Image: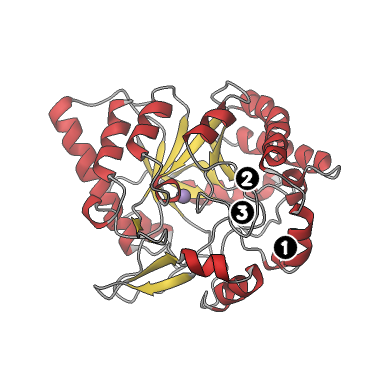
Amino acid sequence: MEMTFRWYGRGNDTITLDMIRQIPGVKGIVWSLHDIPAGDVWTQERIVDEVNYIKSKGFDADVVESVNIHESIKLGIPARDQYIENYKETLRILGANGIKVVCYNFMPVFDWLRTELYKEMPDGSTAMYFEKSKVENQTAESIVKEFEDNAKGMTLPGWEPERLADLKGLFAAYADITEDDLFDNLAYFLQAVVPVAEEVGIKMAIHPDDPPWPIFGLPRIVRDEEHLEKLLNIIDSPSNSLTICTGSLGSSAGNNLPELVRKFGSRGRIAFIHVRNVKRFEDGSFIESSHRTQDGSVDIVDVVRALYEVGFTGYCRPDHGRHLWNEVSRPGYGLYDRALGIMYLWGIWDTLVDEHGAIATK
Ligand SMILES: [Mn+2]
């Protein structure tokens, strides 16, 4: 297992690579070119510049999260073919520069959604919170406005203002799209890009829906074991792989994360894993808790044990953390709690290795 850390780039993150270097055992940086609009080709020049900077600080740049997918591809409208060509071109350039994994998602309109970015917890820290009844009872417009107003000036990945400006138009475009349609559009995309990914040595790794249920009537197709199985069957190739996100999938009580890791990990189809915990409440709401098993609803100890058991040699990163000790950071992406999370994961992993021996590493 290779430990990585998500970083938003120079001038776009409160955290520097020099800080990340001081977290034990972090080998790679998960990066993206956040200023490039979804659908545009990433140029060789920009990619080389970013990869070289990351490498100059002693990290590898093997994982990109994300190369976002243009809405026309999700909608399945004719304009998609040009955007798919652009996506293939980006993959070719990334592959030529040694990138191994591209994380992406296929969620209509919203990449992820919470109702509060800084909800206070009993210990005084804050964390991202999703109140189910609020999403069910408020309009998308009012939730989005509140969300953006509360971001404390931070840009939110997947929440490009230019795209969300026409929320009504986007919703209208999806009005007739069923889950089957969306799945067909995903299959069309994968059939086009996976052969290119294979050629250039990249694993495409889809991120599950967050939260893993339909919101505002929009279709959602990456929510549970059945969905994951179905999408892997579109093309049986390591270049059609998964990003397992224990927090996203774990927000739904029906998902047994250690079981999913054992099932898909033993088939070599997990390229990347986001590990974080989430505390579910009886009304379907959830909050992003510390990584510790006892603090949330996901058995993180067993998730790590499952990774060990399947001989996981892919990439892992701590996912969202709480905001601690008055740290000002991107929502969910502070330094402190993610660093604590890494040490928790290493504690479990190193104990397993100590007791049962090292697994083969790449
Ligand atoms: Mn995630």
Task: Look at 60% across and 47% down and name the residue there.
Answer: 220
Vertically, is 296 above or below 144? Answer: above
Eye-nearest disc, 2 or 3: 2
Q: Residue furthest right?
A: 78
Specify the amino acid type for callout 2: Phe
Position of 230 compared to 324: left or right?
Answer: right
Q: Secondary structure at mark 1?
A: helix
- Classify the position of the N terminus by image quarter: top left
Q: Amino acid at mark 3?
A: Leu
Q: Residue at x 73, y 32 (%)?
A: 188
Residue 39: horizontal and vertical position, in percent? Answer: 74, 49
Numbered tag placed on residue 106 in the rendering: 2
Q: Which residue is mark 3?
A: 33
**Residue 50 in the image, given as x and y percentages of width and height:** 57, 51
Number of the label disc, if any, that sits on residue 163: 1
Query: Which tag, 1 or 3, sits closer to the chain's start?
Result: 3
